Amino acid sequence: MFKINPQILYKTIENTHRAPVVAVLYNRIFGNVVTIAEDSECSIWRPANGEQIFSFFDTERNDETHITCANFDDAGRRLMTGDHHGVVRVCNAVLSVSSNKLPVQKK
């Protein structure tokens, strides 16, 4: 349950995601909390009141691809996610535009 302020007087969302959450990040540039689930759903929240601003999916991933890690770049404008197949994607956190797949270097 995503409740930050116990003084919130309106209804809050009971379940923030349909799949297990693998990352909770704070974006210091925009002052938002970002939650990311295994199924590639990314939700943006206002931490002061728990309001969900919006959410989106990485449509390049499928039901058999599970995100295992995520982080922002130093500027807080690109969201990077990695999955259990070793694929790393970079998403524009400002526009929620997905995504560039980083190339795999073969040795």
Image (cartoon, rainbow, N blue to C red):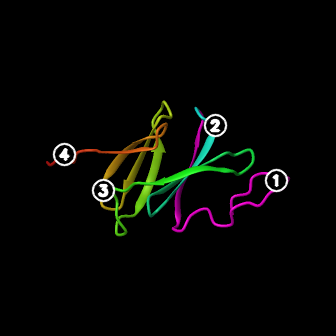
Instruction: Single out the mark in the foreground, 3 or 1.
Output: 1
Q: In the figure, is residue 16 to the left or right of 100?
A: right
Instruction: Single out the mark in the foreground, 1 or 4.
Output: 1
Q: Which residue is drawn at 21% across and 48% down?
A: 104
Residue 97 point in image, percent of width and height = 41, 43
Q: Is mark 2 on a helix, strand or loop?
A: loop
Q: Do the residues labelled 3 and 2 touch (CB within 8 Å)?
A: no
Q: Is mark 1 on a helix, strand or loop?
A: loop
Q: Which of marks 3 and 2 is nearer the N terminus?
A: 2
Q: Name the residue under label 3.
A: 86
Q: Mark 1 points at which residue?
A: 8
Instruction: Single out the mark in the foreground, 3 or 2.
Output: 2
**Residue 65 image-quadrant placement:** bottom left
Q: What element carries label 4?
A: loop
Point out which mark residue 95 bears: none
Identity, as a three-letter code, of the amino acid under mark 3: Gly
